[in-house]
Amino acid sequence: MVTLLVILLIIFCVALALFVLIQNPKGGGLATGGSGSNMFGVQRTGDVLEKGTWVLLTLIVIASLAITTVGKSGAGVTSTGAAGKADELINKAATPSVIGGGAPANSTTPAATPKTGDTTKK
């Protein structure tokens, strides 16, 4: 499911880039002086390309939110997938040793005592 949403998001982004590049410049740019009534240099609101741009922008936002929602809920992720393998590796990771060689605080086994070998001098 996530893969499908990511593919749709990429398609929407490419289409948005094409829609923006196809549009004719509507004048001004940074040289407009910042007039408040003419937002982003738009002169005609009925333009098909402009409406398509807004629709694609809305679709990108919706697809992004859907990916986030599906990703957080865990839907679409199987235990045999790459995420399942990563979780297994994390769970199998060795616990770090405590500085000083003592047993970890959460350990239930007692610390091993050193072996006493032959103490006689030769």
Image (cartoon, rainbow, N blue to C red):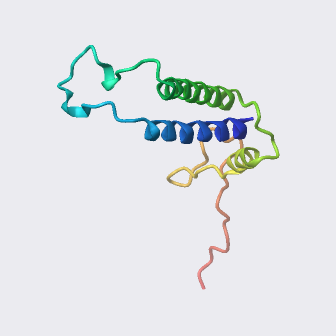
* Residue pictured at 82% horizontal, 46% vertical: 80
Query: Residue 66: where, in percent of width, then height?
Result: 64, 26
Query: Residue 52: where, in percent of width, then height?
Result: 53, 27
Q: Quadrant of residue 75?
A: top right
Would residue 50 appear left or right of 80 to someone viewing this image?
left
* Residue pictured at 80% horizontal, 40% vertical: 78
Q: Nearer the viewer, residue 35 or 27?
A: 27
Q: Nearer the viewer, residue 50 or 1?
A: 50
Would residue 68 appear left or right of 21 to someone viewing this image?
right
Q: Nearer the viewer, residue 97 or 3?
A: 3
Residue lying farthest to the bottom in this orientation: 122
Q: Quadrant of residue 34?
A: top left
- Tally the numbered discs: 0
**On screen, residue 24 above or below 122:** above
Residue 105 appears in view? no
Query: Residue 106: where, in percent of width, then height?
Result: 64, 38
Which quadrant is home to the N terminus? top right
Would residue 87 appear left or right of 60 to someone viewing this image?
right
